[in-house]
Amino acid sequence: MTEKARIRTSDFATASLSVMSAMRADRELCDVVLSVDGTDVTVSAHRVVLAAASPYFRAMFSSGMLESRESVVRLADTEVGALRSLVDYAYTGEISVDDSNVDALFLAAHQFQFTEVVYCCEEILIYRIDPSNCISWAKTAQEYDCSLLRRIANRCVAYNVLSLAEIDDGLMALSFDDFANILAMDELVVDSEEQVIELVKKWVGKQAEPPANAEATLLQNCVRWPLLNLKLPSEETVKASSHNSEDVGDTEIPPYRSGSPAVLVAAGGSCHCKHHSDDHAVAYANSYSPIHDSWKAFPSLNHSRYALAVVNASGSLYAVGGLQFVGTSESFELPKRCNFVERYDSESKRWIDVSPMGVSRSGEFCVEMGGRIYACGNGKIDHAMSAESYDPQLDKWQFISAPELNSVVVEKMLHVDGMLHALAFQNFPGLVHLKYDPVVDKWVELFVRGDYGNFIRESFVTLGHSFFSFNCDGSVSQMDTRTGEWSEFGRHATMGMITMVGHDNKIYALNGSEFLWMDVRMKNWIASESPSPVADRSGAAPLDGINY
């Protein structure tokens, strides 16, 4: 009987490359020297290793080119440090990329076809894109065929298209295809399709020799005519600058442009730690960039807390109240409401303690209105309701009249049409809707909804004249604040989403592991990257008008 044996060493390839790297350091069995034009720098290597790591070198060494027979290969337009790093990468599979070397590495990796290194460089370069350079980055990305870089740059152009059209000739210098691609994007930020028509006419007017039928083609393919409640233009009528063709009829209306999601900040929260049996409060914060569709670290709060309110008021961001874990009761910490208030200072890039509230509060008790911050309730059953307002200019809180209700929990404070609204629950009769007029300092009870048992909610959000209630059974209820009438809005995908923000036709839902947003006109939820590190019950607010 023939004896058989088989061996498989799991780290053989890694070990072999490690040995070859050591051999290269000693120039042992190296069979090629890379020389950088214009310098006396040389880099020794093994052809087979370079060929295995790079299609560029594989073609060079195996195609019968002159370099395949030369022991010294001269390379033009190459940065020395980048070349050395890429050769090291071919032997180790490791490379360090940062702001100091990303430009040179990006160019060299593209030149020598180190695809994974190109992707790594893109992940850094996308954070350099802003409205001042997005058009040039879009052109660079197209030149180097970098899909991620191009997607982010085009998104930035779409988000800022109106301002770029006013101040940047680069937008008007885009090619027909590139300009058409921008105008066709769902993310294009315009107030109406009339502005898209204006952009088309301006682009055509800026061209010395526009392509044949350019205006007609752009108008027909890029303008979402049914959203204008107008008639679709024929080619002839477009040329005549009138829109009198056949009626739209049963033409399917294209989706609203989703536009740009808001720049958000999520601060504080509760997080489970492997060193503790229970959750604990955190102070860290994250900001969401819609251009990059990703979160990054934001300066941490001074005080760890969760179930806090984050409010944008008078051009500043405030973190108000919340719950802290203080002291212990047997094996677990007890949460305690706090009255801390912190303001984010955009110059020093840090949070600063300002005057505390008169009462400790937690939950969705806080809202901005008219440049002031209003707080009502404290996140638990109030036997003696209180309310107060904060003047950012004076850094001062003062008590205002409180709703004349007992044994009530304020679930959400909202601002609609210059009036303060509070949604509160009582054991009986149920949901109570209150309105506060700051001019007369008085609360009015608008209505009571008694079906409390069928109305267990996860969160409330306000947009325009509507309240949206996200209920624990997966349903969404919508109330018109002008009539007090409720209707069913649909279903939601936000179960467990404690932190929810409404802003500019969009609702944002966030918990420790997921981040979703929806344009209420289209009712479609879009999943995006969640913050890292993650926390539940954070406070969140948009950063409109705040330099961060």
Image (cartoon, rainbow, N blue to C red):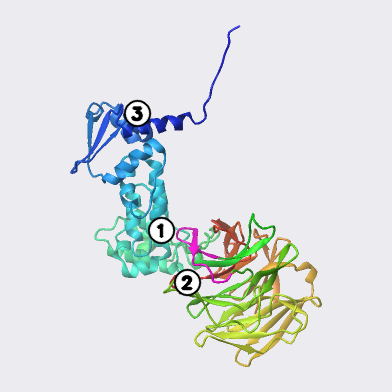
Q: Which residue is mark 1?
A: 127
Q: Quadrant of residue 236?
A: bottom left
Q: In the image shown, does 30 or 393 lie closer to the viewer?
A: 30
Q: Is residue 113 depicted above or below 257 in this figure? A: above
Q: Locate the N terminus by quadrant.
A: top right
Asked whether residue 141 is drawn in magenta, I would say: no
Q: Please state if 349 lies on the left or on the right of 341 as rendered.
A: left
| Residue 294 picture location, percent across and down | 49, 58
Asked whether residue 285 is drawn in magenta, I would say: yes
At label 1, the amino acid type is Tyr
Q: Is residue 542 depicted above or below 48 in this figure? A: below
Q: Which residue is mark 3?
A: 48
Q: Element under label 3?
A: helix
At label 2, the amino acid type is Arg
Q: Which residue is mark 2?
A: 350
Question: Can you name the residue that lies furthest to the top here?
Answer: 1
- In contact (CB < 8 Å): disc 3 and disc 2: no
In the rendered structure, which disc, 3 or 2, sits on the residue that comes first in sequence? 3
Magenta extent? 284-303
- Image depth: mark 3 or mark 1 in front: 3
